Amino acid sequence: MKILFQVVLRMNTTHHPIKSRPMISLLSAQFLSALADNALLFAAIALLQAQLAPNWQIPLLQEFFVLAYIVLAPFVGPFADSYPKGRVMLIANAIKLVGASAMLLGLNPLVSYGLVGLGAAAYSPAKYGILSEMVSREQLVKANAFMEGSTIVAILLGAVVGGFLASKHLSIALIAVCGCYFVAALMNLLIPKLPAIKPVATFAPIALVQHFKQVLTLLIVQRDARLALFGGSVFWGAGATLRLLLVAWVPIALHNSDISMPANLSGVVAIGIAIGAAMAAKFVRLKDVARVLPVGISIGALIILFAHSTHLYVAIGLLIFIGAAGGFYVVPLNALLQQCGHATVGAGNAVAVQNFFENCSMLILVGFYVLMERNGLPVVRAATIFGCVIFVSIGLIARARMQKTSFT
């Protein structure tokens, strides 16, 4: 009876993926977890500022966070594909809760945020991999749009609420973050225990590293998977760096030193991403995914324009356009990779490889920004250089795709 119930449940979520209880539970858990992630970032930034830490340590928060994604990349994909993904998400949220609690109790913010990164690294392959198990191919872009939409709303609220609470009372902000992680873990219990799709034979580290290399190779040789990996990586690296750039840009361009202002502007980008994700769900199909590349190129140009803006409302408008272009660009790429992974190496494995590429991109781009910050480069010039890097990078990916070269 239990097996029959699971089969019927999966059929129902395939036909009604958004309105079904499993999808609502999944989206709710993702919303709360993402809200806490983003609120915690601004709380950690405020904590570093309260401790009079050097400015270059602020972008290091992101470096500590993404390092876990890179180190654990060979392990989290097999882990997600070897167990019911809802339970994997439960474990990951518990690790995040431990990291946030450690920050509340006085552990170094960099170390604490790095511990939260461990949970996030385990969480990501499960949350995206489960979509291809719960919905059909035809509904995958739409399901991704809803996932991204809930995530973006969470980013918006997390940044705004986290910045506001951190500016008023740090302890309250950290307690609220811990509460969100706890409730998210409870929501994970409502996700059905879907059977493992591609369990691994062993969890020996050497074997898993070799397995990861095989999975990476299998994806790299696929033209569509290559496009999704490289294209998505540049976007998420850009997003992580832009969020940190805002912290330094706002006091210079807008003459406002309140930590809640860059948090609110991060929320504005999130609004744009939600708009772009909705447009992608309506207008883009997997077979037409290449049409999003010109939109991706425009992200770099918009960042350059934003870098030189000095008026709040102009900056808000440009950030909305940046977010909309990003959402329209990245959602179909995510869906494309999940479909490629589900058909070959397992969606969890595919997302783990995706996380490896994306977080290497974040590590490189944020590290590049740290170097510019430590060398005293003016933030407007740094943001302009950063926009040029994004413009050229996505432009090269688009050019290679259009020419059907061996790269993409």
Image (tube, rainbow, N blue to C red):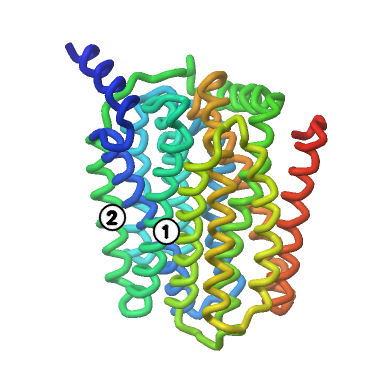
Residue 111 in the image: above or below residue 130: below
Mark drawn on residue 180: 2
Judged left or right of residue 223, residue 62 is left
- Distance in Å between CA atoms under marks 1 and 2: 13 Å
> Is 247 above or below relative to 18?
below
Give me the disc on residue 155: 1
Quadrant (top left, top right, bottom left, bottom right) of the C terminus: top right
Which residue occupies 27% across, 44% down?
185
Given residues 230 and 282, the one toward you in this image is 282
| Residue beneath the point at 66% across and 66% down | 303
Q: Position of residue 193 (x, y in %)?
A: 28, 25
- Image label count: 2
In what element is the residue under mark 2? Answer: helix
Indicate the position of residue 53 as horizontal and vertical percent values: 53, 76
> Quadrant of the image for the N terminus?
top left
Q: Amino acid at mark 1?
A: Ile
